[in-house]
Image: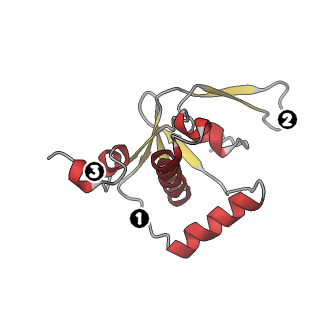
């Protein structure tokens, strides 16, 4: 398991659909290793992960924490998959909820808040819920989905 490395980055950088170069200092080594999160990456939640189980209270707690100050949202564990795709091994509940919140803010306030309108998060694919990406694209308006 010597290939496991970690660092701290902002949620905005993690979720933003742009190239992001991350410099990582390994203990006992000189210099930095560079890890690139590529533009158009997709975070994939494998079908062995449990479905989202956050309650309204969990979401409200997260929103209050974000509103009150910068917070450490916990570990996110990725495994490189294919090309620019990553399996999201740990943190899928938080990432899914954060992307849902971003999608809601874009749908509700993009005409009023410039930063929301132009923020483009990366894609999330939930293998056990294949229609999730379509629902996100249509802002969860079921009548706009095609068969």
What residue sits right under mark 3 in the picture? 131
Secondary-structure class at tag 1: loop
What residue sits right under mark 1 in the picture? 50
Local crowd size for mark 2, using a 10 Å CA cut-off: few (<14), some (14–19), many (≥20): few
Mark 3 or 2, closer to the camera = 3
* Residue 64 found in image quarter: bottom right
Secondary-structure class at tag 3: loop
- Which mark sits nearer the N-terminus, 3 or 2? 2
Front position in the image: 10 or 105: 105
Local crowd size for mark 1, using a 10 Å CA cut-off: few (<14), some (14–19), many (≥20): few
Q: Residue furthest left?
A: 147
Asked if 98 appears above or below 111 in the picture, the reply is: below
Secondary-structure class at tag 2: loop
Front position in the image: 69 or 86: 69
Gap in Å between the C-alphas at discs 3 and 2? Answer: 45 Å
Q: Name the quarter where the N terminus is drawn.
A: top right
Q: In the picture provided, is 33 more to the left or to the right than 120?
A: right
Q: Residue at x 25, y 55 (%)?
A: 142
Q: Residue at x 47, y 52 (%)?
A: 104
What residue sits right under mark 2 in the picture? 28
Q: Residue at x 77, y 53 (%)?
A: 70
- Which mark sits nearer the N-terminus, 3 or 1? 1
Q: In the picture provided, is 72 more to the left or to the right than 63?
A: right
Q: Residue at x 56, y 27 (%)?
A: 18
Gap in Å between the C-alphas at discs 3 and 1? Answer: 16 Å
Coordinates of residue 59 in the picture (x, y in percent): 56, 67
Q: How is the image coloured?
A: secondary structure
């Amino acid at each position: 398991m010597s290939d496991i490395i970690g660092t701290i980055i902002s949620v905005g950088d993690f979720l933003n659909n742009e190239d992001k170069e991350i410099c990582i200092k390994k203990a006992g080594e000189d210099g930095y290793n560079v890890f690139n999160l590529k533009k158009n990456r997709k975070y994939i939640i494998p079908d062995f992960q449990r479905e989202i189980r956050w309650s309204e209270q969990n979401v409200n707690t997260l929103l209050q924490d974000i509103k009150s100050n910068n917070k450490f949202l916990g570990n996110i564990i990725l495994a490189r998959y294919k090309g620019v795709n990553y399996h999201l091994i740990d943190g899928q509940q938080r990432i899914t909820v954060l992307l849902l919140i971003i999608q809601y803010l874009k749908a509700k306030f993009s005409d009023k808040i410039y930063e929301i309108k132009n923020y483009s998060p990366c894609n999330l694919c939930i293998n056990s819920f294949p229609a999730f990406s379509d629902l996100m694209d249509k802002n969860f308006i079921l009548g706009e989905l095609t068969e």
